[in-house]
Amino acid sequence: MSYMLPHLHNGWQVDQAILSEEDRVVVIRFGHDWDPTCMKMDEVLYSIAEKVKNFAVIYLVDITEVPDFNKMYELYDPCTVMFFFRVIFKLLFTWHIVGL
């Protein structure tokens, strides 16, 4: 489902997505589109995107294409979802499933 959600393709787009949104939570999934863990997360995010559109916007970032934040946010797990509200960052969870 990653093709159904908007992708951010460089660090500037990520920064602008976070900085320009004043009223909604910015949800960013960092990972790889081809990773099975990310594929499952993308399905979940896609399934809620329409329901939360009034108070949240969802983006995907491939950490190989956009490595700018890997060190800063310690993006070492296959799939990490971060939430930003008025430029304040909250990490609620990373998702790592062994045995997929």
Image (tube, helix red, strand yellow):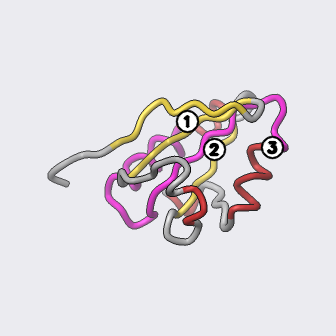
Q: Secondary structure at mark 1?
A: helix
Question: x, y (%) of residue 56?
Answer: 69, 33
Q: Are marks 2 and 3 in contact (CB under 8 Å)?
A: no
Disc on res. 93: none
**Earlier along the polypeptide chain: callout 1 or callout 3?**
3
Q: Is 55 on the left or on the right of 69, as rendered?
A: right
Q: Which residue is mark 2?
A: 58
- Cα gap from disc 2 to disc 3, whole angstroms: 14 Å
Amino acid of disc 2: Ile
- Residue at image location 70% in from the left, 55% down from the top: 14
User: Which residue is label 3 attached to?
Assistant: 19
| Nearest to viewer (mark 1 / mark 3) | 3
User: Against 52, is 98 above or below?
Assistant: below
Q: Residue furthest left?
A: 99
Q: Which residue in the structure is indicated by mark 1?
A: 48
Write down the region rendered in magenta.
Answer: 20-47
Question: Nearest the camera: 52 or 22?
Answer: 22
